[in-house]
Structure formats: C-alpha cells, structure tokens
Amino acid sequence: MNNLLPVFILNELVILPNQEIKIDLSNEHSKKIIKLSCKNNENKILVIAPKNSLESDPSIEDLPKVGVIALIKSKVELPNNNLRVILKGENRVSIQKYFQNKNTNILKCMVDVIDLPVFSKANETAIKRKLTQLLKEYITLNKNVSNSILKNINELKTLDYLTDIIASFLPFSFNKKLLYMETINPLNRANDLINDLNEEINICNIDRELDEHLQENIENGQREYILKEKLKEINKELGNTKESEISLLREKLAKLEIDEKTRYKLNNEIDKYSVCSDYSPESSVIKNYLDTILNLPWNKSSEVCLNTSKVSTILNESHYGLKEVKNRIIEYVYLLKKNPNISSPIICLLGMPGVGKTSIASSIAKALNRPFYKISVGGLNDSTELIGSRKTYLGSSPGKIMQAIIKCKVNNPVILIDEVDKMVKDYKGDPASTLLEILDDVQNKYFVDNYIEEPFDLSKVMFILTANNEEGIPLTLLDRLEIIKMDGYLVSQKIDIAKNYLVKNILKEYNSDLRVSKEVLEYVILNYTKEPGVRELKRVLDRLIRKVMVYEKDVKNITILHVNKYLENKEYNYLPEVTSCGIVNCLAYTTMGGKLSHIEVAKYKGTGKIIITGGAQEVLKESVQVVISYLISNYNIDLKSQDIHIHFMETALKKDGPSAGVSIAVALLSLINKKKIPSSIAFTGELSLKGDILPIGGLKEKITSAVEMGINKIYVPSANSGEVQNLMSEILDNIEIIMVNNFSQIYDGLFK
C-alpha cells in the first residue's frame, strides 16, 4: 500500500481495529482533514496518538511509526458549527514516511500493510479459549459490562481481532491502550491481556469484598438498633427499667450515714435524674455525679495498726536512721490508741533530694495499715486541680484530693503532697490558699470539693508534705505544718545504708551472691557520689553490681579495681590549695546540702572601685558592702587609691545569702596584712557593721561537708551554739569548732 493518507492526530485517545469512536470536532484544521479524506481517499484516514499528549504541535520525527487506518462512517454538521464524526478502526499499519503539505498544512503519510506472524492453530485456539474464559469471569464480576459482548467475541475467528476487541472495552489507561495498538504480534497482545484480565478480576473481587463489608456494617447497625429496641421492650416486661436503676440508687443512699442536708440534696438529684430523658446530655452528667458521690467512702475506714512495736519494726526495716520521723509516728500511734478521735498530724518532711522523704511516707502508710496516695504539686498553679471543677462543666471531675479518697476507698488514707515548696501563684489561682483549707484540722472537717458540692470530712486523713527548702513553703501554710528536718547523711551513715539496705536489695533483685566490702562502699561514696542523700549512690551501686555480674562471671567479691573499671567518671570538688594571701575557705548551703568553696581577693591601683564576680546575687553583694564599711571604719584601711576585686569560685553557680560576710572580711585582711590563711580552716557567719557575727542557717550541712573535705577547724557564730551541741559525736570528734560572737575575736586569733 503506497498511496498517501491524511493523518488525523488524536490526543489522549486511542482507536483500535474493529473499534468505533464518536468525536465532535470544533477545530477547522481537523474538519479540513476529514473533508479531504472523504473526497480523495474513499473516507479513509490514518489515526495516530502521540505519546506526549501535552505537546500541541509535535515534530514529524516524534510521531509514532504505527497507526490505525479508520473508516469515516458518518459525519454530521451540528447546530453549534461542530462536526460530529464516527470513526471505525480497520487495520493496524506501519508508517513509512510523513509528508507535510506547505499550502494546506495537512499532514499525510505513506503506509505499508503489516504481515502478521504465523503460529500454530492449536496454540491460537488455546489462547482464544483462555481469553474467552477470563473474559466471561470478568463480565460476571463487573456489572458495568454487557453480556452481549460475549456473542460478538464468539463470532471472531482470528486471535488478532479478538485481542483488539477485548482491549478496546477494558478500562485501560491511555498509555496501556497505546501499547496494545503498537504491539504487532497478536500472541504477545493475548499474553498481555491474560495478565491484565487477571489483574482486573482481582480488582473486581476486592471491590466486591469492600461492598459486601460495607453492606454488612449497615446491616449490623440496623440489627443493633433493632436489638436495642427489643431489649427495651424485654426490660419493660421484666421490670428492668430506669425505675429499677433509680431504686438501686435510693438503696445506696439509704445505707449512707450522712447529714440530712446532704441526703436531701442527693434525693433531689435522684428525682431530677428520674424525670430526665435518656437522650438528654444532662442525664449522663447527673448519673456520673450520683455514681461518684454515692460511692465515696463516707463512713468506711481502714483498720489502723495500733501496735507501736510492729510499726517501729516496719519503719526500721525500710529506712535507716530518721529517728525524729519515726518517733513522731510512734507517738501518734500511742496517742491514737488512747483516743481514737485524735487528729492526724500534718507533717512536712523538709530535706534535700535523695534523703528518703517520699519513701518514708510510703513506709508510714504501710506501717499504719493505711492506703497510700501521692499528689505532686510541683509547678501547680491552678486551684481547681486540688478542689475540682463544677459538674456542669464539660469534662468536669473531682479534684486531686477527692480522687485520692475515691481510689483509696477509705476516708483515712495517707496522702503525700509532694514538693509543696514549688507551687506557683499566678492569675490562674493560689493553690497554697486552697491547700490551707485542706490541711487545717478545723476547716477540713467540712471540706467541699467543687464537683462533689457537699462537705466531706478529711480530718481522718494523714497528710504528709515534702519540701526541699523551707523558704519556698508559702507562709500561709508554714504555721499549720509540723516541720521535721531530714538532714543529709554522713559517709559512715551512707556506708551503713548501702550495706544493710541498698546492696542487699539489689542483690536480692538480681538473685546474686556477690559480696561488697565496707572499704569498696566507702571508696564509691567518696569518689563517685557527691550528694546529701543516697539516690545517686543506689544508681551507682546498681550499675557496678550489674556490670560485674555480666562481665566478671567468676568473681565473688567486688574490688576497687572493679569500681575503677566500670565506674569511669569520678566526682571531684575542685578547691585550689591555699598558696597565697587573699584566699579563704567559705562554707555555703545549697538545696543539695553543704558546700565548701573559695573566696579570692585581689587589689591593684585604682580609684576605690569594688569589683564582684562569680555569680554573686543581690544579698551577697550587699554583704560585701557591709564588710568593706566595717573594715574601713574599724581597722584604718584606706582603699581610695586602689581597686578591690572579690571573686567567688565556681562562677557557673549562682550564690546568695549573707553568711559569707566573715569569709570576705578574712580574705580582705589576709591580702592587706599579707598573711596566708591555712587551707584547713573554714568560716561561716553574717557580719554586721559593728562587727557582730550573726547566726546562719544550714549549719549541720555546712559542717558535714567541711569534715568530708578535710577541714579541721571552723569559725561558727556563737548564736548557733545550740545546733552545735546537737551534732553527732562523729562530727565533733573530727573537727574543731570555734564559737565567736564578734569579728574582733577572729582578728585577734589570726592577725595578731
């Protein structure tokens, strides 16, 4: 076939042999091509589909080499000036060459008939049967395809026609159909169709399963609705109606021993619930409220252990030392045995982190045979967290106190209120004032939670509070609390705790028979922990024992070599040796216990300026001014022609408080008099303008840290003599404490 045929380009549309398509043409150029074909080419035209449909004017080189000769079966001029054309594909042909007419701009081509490959009759028949079988299965599953297509397919004798007919009506993409059009070998087209038909059948099966699942869900929803309606009717027949539920609520109310006002209020709530529709949102609000308030332990108390020996044994088994706390609980148990109506003490355990405040509270609950509940108020700034919100609010609930009562199921639990010194007061509320009502033994007998709305007696509850710093406890609470200080432990005490409690519990947990000597424990405490408590010590020992068990399986005794091997990072207190004048040891108190640091002083020519560095805060800066004024007025020191630089070691730590006054004065005099102060001496005390040495806080912690750092002499205000007398002999035997009430005593002892 060598005659030239007009070329008709279809974008995003493919025509296959034996396929009919109908298109409406509005483009004048396309209309000219159709008219030319009808006039000169016996209504025949070559239809091609470029792969890049987005290119409006493709070059001849990019046009495909395979196309379909189509017959123009009809063309109709429409009222809107469009031309409606029906095309029927006839033969797949090979395009030899394209020609562009410069005058008409119509593309023509020269084509050749494609010779189809020859294959066996048996092979063709087998493929045709397989295609027909899959097509029948597909038509059965796909309701959108007419069964009449099967009749037309049965009449087709060649595999070439069969594949084109099937590919023409399957919901393939443009690229997929274009691939079928360009595939010459019918056998290859047939094999591709078998794969694609199988895939379409799988898709139809998935669609059918989804439809069935959706229908099943709809039917289940209807079934559930019908069953609920039937259940309502059955309950009516059996008498299991809302009336029976209300009757049960009234029975619960009748069993409660509550005052008449509360009983009257709850009766009204039950009456309101009885007339409220089940579909009303208020119904669930009232029901939740009634369930909460009727299940409160109004009269239910746990049986408290009144055996002082048993209570003492339990406390001693769980904690070392802490005599003041333990004695207070023993006293309470003894008095409770004498008078069951005695008020529970409101104890505040004051101490640094890790000394056992929370754990001793839990042991107290266990010893007293009471449930234990912990409430953390650190960072709390919303009062409703403690006293709840109104039941009419969305998502309302009782406050933390009543939640504790509900969960403990008794009206006399032990409730721990943790970190009371870290509460926050802001625009959201003042939780300290709210806590005051809860803790006050006069007011808490009639405590009213916002959600409960009725008074509940909290006087039987034992409240235990914890705090790290007394200054952080709100003043409104401080005079209501019984403060019990829990001091940090000495090295010897830590050794006993580690040996008798920590190591024993760790070995029991790991089911190990390792042995840890006293020397190893002391080495670990001195070199790997710097804390007043034993929390970090427990973690370090746990790690050491765990490592030795896993990596030293034949070892029975843990040695210092094992410690150095598995606990790499030692703890160091960097305190320079006193090698020159103007350097003095100063004792400080932090939330983590006592601390020994240095004050350095330097002077040089200047104008009398005082420079203070090292993280000093306002109170400490004022203390420096007091010291300067005292020394100038009492020791004829002239600082007008020189500047003084006072530096507090460990700059990263903020430092505040007046107790460094004595240390600053000694450091300045050491520099001015050019006399070195021995590194074995430390100082603490606030200095006044008249030279009086005022009392300071945290004395025990300061002296304890001094002993651990090797200090053998401390100057202490005489006003703190009572605290010194209460120190353990273990501390007093290792250090010389010099009591002073005026700085002149220190001056006479060091500089004369």
Image: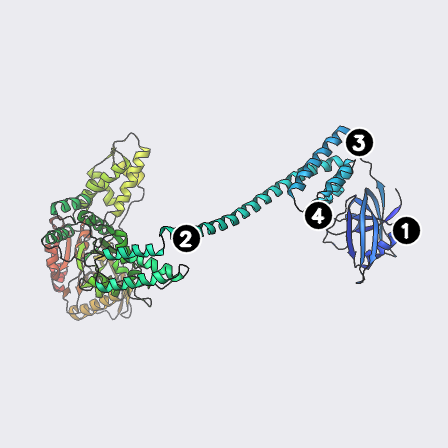
Q: Is residue 470 left or right of residue 152?
A: left
Seen at 26% across and 44% down, the residue is 538
Seen at 22% across and 38% down, the residue is 504
Label 4 or label 2, whichever lies nearer to me, is 2
Tag shown at residue 40: 1
Q: Of marks 1 and 3, which one's residue comes earlier in the chain?
A: 1
Report, in whole angstroms, how far the alpha carbon at label 1 lies from the one at label 4: 31 Å
- Secondary structure under the numbered disc 3 in the rendered image: loop
Q: Of marks 1 and 2, which one's residue comes earlier in the chain?
A: 1
Label 2 or label 3, whichever lies nearer to me, is 2
Tag shown at residue 174: 4
Which quarter of the figure is the N terminus placed in? top right
- Secondary structure under the numbered disc 4 in the rendered image: helix
Specify the amino acid type for callout 2. Answer: Lys
Q: Residue furthest front?
A: 237
Which quarter of the figure is the C terminus placed in? bottom left
Q: Position of residue 382 (x, y in %)?
A: 32, 63
Q: Is residue 280 left or right of residue 54?
A: left
Residue under label 3: 118
Q: Position of residue 329 (x, y in %)?
A: 15, 52
Q: Nearer the viewer, residue 392 or 237?
A: 237
Residue 219 in view here: yes
Tag shown at residue 673: none
Q: Is residue 560 above or below residue 23?
A: above
